[in-house]
Amino acid sequence: MGKPVDVIQSVRLDDENNTLILLDQTVLPNEKNFLHLKELKDIWGAIYHLKVRGAPAIGIAAAYGVYLGTKQSAAESYEELYLDFKKAKEYLASSRPTAVNLFWALDRMEARFQKEEGKAAAEIKQALKEEAEKIRAEDEKVCESIGQHALSILEPGWGILTHCNAGTIATAKYGTALAPIYLGQEKGYDFKVYADETRPLLQGARLTAWELEEAGVDVTLICDNMASIVMKEGKIQAVLVGCDRVAANGDAANKIGTSGVAILAKHYNIPFYVCAPLSTVDLACKTGDDIHIELRDSEEITSKWYEKPMAPDGVKTYNPAFDVTDNELITGIITENGIAYAPYTESLPKMFK
Ligand code: MRU
């Protein structure tokens, strides 16, 4: 038997002190530092700067954030409090564009607010807190279910390649793509995980390799451009990745580089699975072309991880944070309610029922 997954709670509410506590994912693995944030602008900044990151964790942080923002309001009437809520909601929604969980969580908080119409401000604030806590608690169960469904198609001893970080720190617990690894670890499955380093922000090296090592999982770090050789050498039996938004046709946006891994997997005949909670499935987006891809600063490519800049001063850069994997490259989309297979326009809506 392996070691059970440690609870590293990356997003937590300290309601008594009106504080959101976040594990700062930008300083890992060198420092395990928790940020204590009270101001909405700091919560916005933490999401924008990827101090909290990973689609489900962003959603949870935004839910707590909009609650804390509303809690600070002195408004007494429903209408006035609603205006303050809306301001906080719109502000947080502007922090990052691609992960639909951010908007999903904020919309869910708004629906809860509206349900409390006519109630006193204090009761509405209490309801918002409950809703945010529910979003967090549900995510833990959802991730565990994704892990169980994924585990049902994996075999002990397999080599599994993953990209970016879709682990416990990107969610309430377990992660999405890493959930079956943790559940398998508890059952002694002995997976051999290959973690792409994930240029330019190194989520694979800094976060996935770190959290799997902490849990005692057999993990090997590779550079992104080594995925092809490990596949060719027969070291990989399945690819599991997380996701930021799945369109109705099954096209899936995830960390930049994911679609390249899917193309390689197809070439080497290796199954490629996207692990996505239903909060990441956006049926309102018809295809991947409708997904807004975040563009980020050039310094992430040119100088961020280097002592000296590693590109000529002022060189043009293009830094999309995500790409879209075409649905025909995806073997299956693993949700908490089961595994959806092509045609996704038919199988994905069924997952919601
Ligand atoms: O820019 P990031 O680090 O937030 O991107 C994260 C990813 O692409 C993850 O794979 C995705 O959000 C799923 S996390 C369970």
Image (cartoon, rainbow, N blue to C red):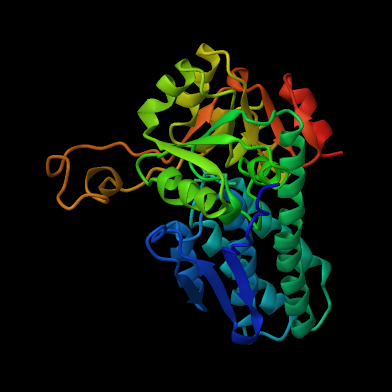
Of the pair 131 and 225, the residue shown nearer to us:
225
- Image-based side of 113 in relation to 60, left or right: right
Of the pair 195 and 76, the residue shown nearer to us:
195
Q: Height in image: 28 above or below 17? A: above
| Quadrant assignment for the C terminus | top right
**Which residue is rendered at x = 35% and y = 42% of the image?**
200
**Which residue is rendered at x = 25% and y = 37% of the image?**
317
Of the pair 75 and 336, the residue shown nearer to us:
336
Q: How many marks?
A: 0
Q: Residue furthest right?
A: 353
**Which residue is rendered at x = 63% and y = 28% of the image?**
273
Q: Position of residue 247 (x, y in %)?
A: 64, 32
Of the pair 208 and 59, the residue shown nearer to us:
208
- Image-based side of 47 in relation to 123, left or right: left
Q: Position of residue 51 (x, y in %)?
A: 45, 61
Quarter holding residue 77: bottom right
Q: Residue furthest front?
A: 1
Quarter holding residue 271: top right
Q: Position of residue 264 (x, y in %)?
A: 48, 18
Q: Height in image: 289 above or below 186? A: above
- Image-based side of 348 in relation to 226, left or right: right
Q: Position of residue 340 (x, y in %)?
A: 75, 28
Q: Height in image: 305 above or below 346? A: below
Residue 348 is at least partly visible in this image:
no
